[in-house]
Structure formats: structure tokens, C-alpha cells
Image (cartoon, helix red, strand yellow):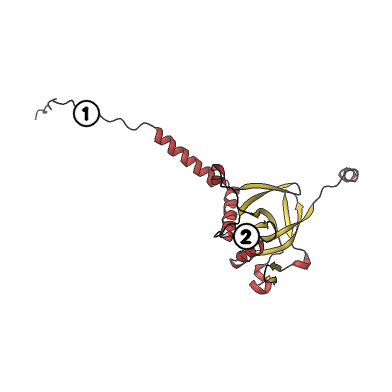
Amino acid sequence: MAAASRTTSQPPRDSTTLHGVFLEVFGQGVLITGRSGLGKSELALELLTRGHRLIADDAVEFERRGQALRGQCPPLLEGFLEARSLGVLNIRRLFGPGSLRKAATLDLVVELGAAMAPASGMERLSGHRGSREILGLSVVEISIPIRLGHNLAVLVEAACRDLKLRRQGYRADEDFSRRQADAIRRAGEPGPRSKPSKKAGQKKTKKPP
């Protein structure tokens, strides 16, 4: 029945190719995207220098497997990364065979972009978080603006660590909001009542020995 229904309707896509750099950071698959010239390759090189692994540069082939997206590199591009001013680099020769991985599950999309407007109160708590739909699956997406002085590699590493905590059920923004609400509630509670002072002129009686 399933095969018959597929012949009468358009079959669902189960694979696609996306532009970006795909790396494994702390065991999680991270796709770095953004328009050309924003520094995706430079960020990838910094992450490789910090011990993370490259899967694919420029063209990443994704395949849906159940409720997961598996990404890999086309054979022609495997092990190479193009960096502005330097050209094509052989990552295996530069960083060793341990700097590469064949494939990984996509866990996080990092979108590099221009500087954004000042963050609102909620954005300051939760960050520029959203989701991107790829092959019918929702993937966590974080937008990072390019600003002078930003250490993007550290931000990506922190985002991966935070994503792990969120999947374990902990969210720092919710924890902070609860702590803030508790502090406000305690500040509004009346303090302990002080004992009434004795009136002026009232003599203090001595207790009998």
C-alpha cells in the first residue's frame, strides 16, 4: 500500500545539499551558515585548532533517517576546506587524520549575520534562538551577529554545551527567571515584627531574689 501511494503522489524528499561548513563540536553536529565573506571558514579553522573535527565544507549532503538528519561530505571535497586569502587547504595534512570525520547527525545550525538591533529583554535571557526546517525536521538554530572583538569559536562551543544541558532538561534562562522571581517575592514579604518598646518613664521592676 505504501509503495502504491508513493507512485500516485509526489514522493517526499529524504536528502538535500546545503551550503555551509559542517563540523563536530563536543560530539554534536554543527552546520555554520551565512552569506559569503562573513568568516565561516575562518571560524571553522579556529574550531579545528581547538580540537574539533571537520565533516564537510561548502556543500554538505544531508539525508533524513527517521527523526534525524545525517550529514556527510561529497567524496570530491572530503578533507578540504577553502579559506579566503589562503585558497584550498588540506585539513588532514594540516591538523592530522583525527581532525576529520566521515559523517555526523545535525544538532545545531549557527547562522552568521550582520550586527542586529539591540536585544529585547527576552532575547537577553534566551538569546537569538529559533529553528530551521530541513527535510521536514525542525533543527535548533542560533543567530550570531558578526561584531568586532567577538570570539565566535568560544560562542559556538558555549552554544553546544548549552544545547546538551537543554536536552537534559536544564535551561539557564528559566533557572535565572525563577531565581529572580523568588528574590522579588522575598523582597515584598513583611519582615519579622519587632517587640514593642517600653514607654518612656516606665520603671523597670526588679525580680525578687
Q: Which part of the image, by quadrant, shows the C terminus?
A: top left
Tell me the element at label 2: strand
User: Does 62 sit left or right of 192 as displayed?
Assistant: right
- Characterize the local packing of mark 2: few (<14), some (14-19) or many (20 or more) Cα atoms within 10 angstroms: many
Query: Type of residue at label 1?
Result: Ser
The residue singled out by tag 2 in the image is: 25
User: Is residue 36 or residue 57 the one in the foreground?
Assistant: 36
Q: Which part of the image, by quadrant, shows the N terminus?
A: top right
User: Does 191 sit left or right of 99 as displayed?
Assistant: left
Residue 115 appears at what percent x and percent y? Answer: 60, 53
Tell me the element at label 1: loop
Residue 56 appears at what percent x and percent y? Answer: 71, 63
Among the 4 quarters of the image, the one containing residue 189? top left
Above or below: residue 52 compared with residue 192: below
Tell me, for residue 133, which label it has, or none.
none
Tell me, for residue 197, which label it has, or none.
1
Residue drawn at x 62%, y 60% as measured from the top left: 25
Residue 74 appears at what percent x and percent y? Answer: 77, 64
Residue 203 appears at what percent x and percent y? Answer: 12, 26
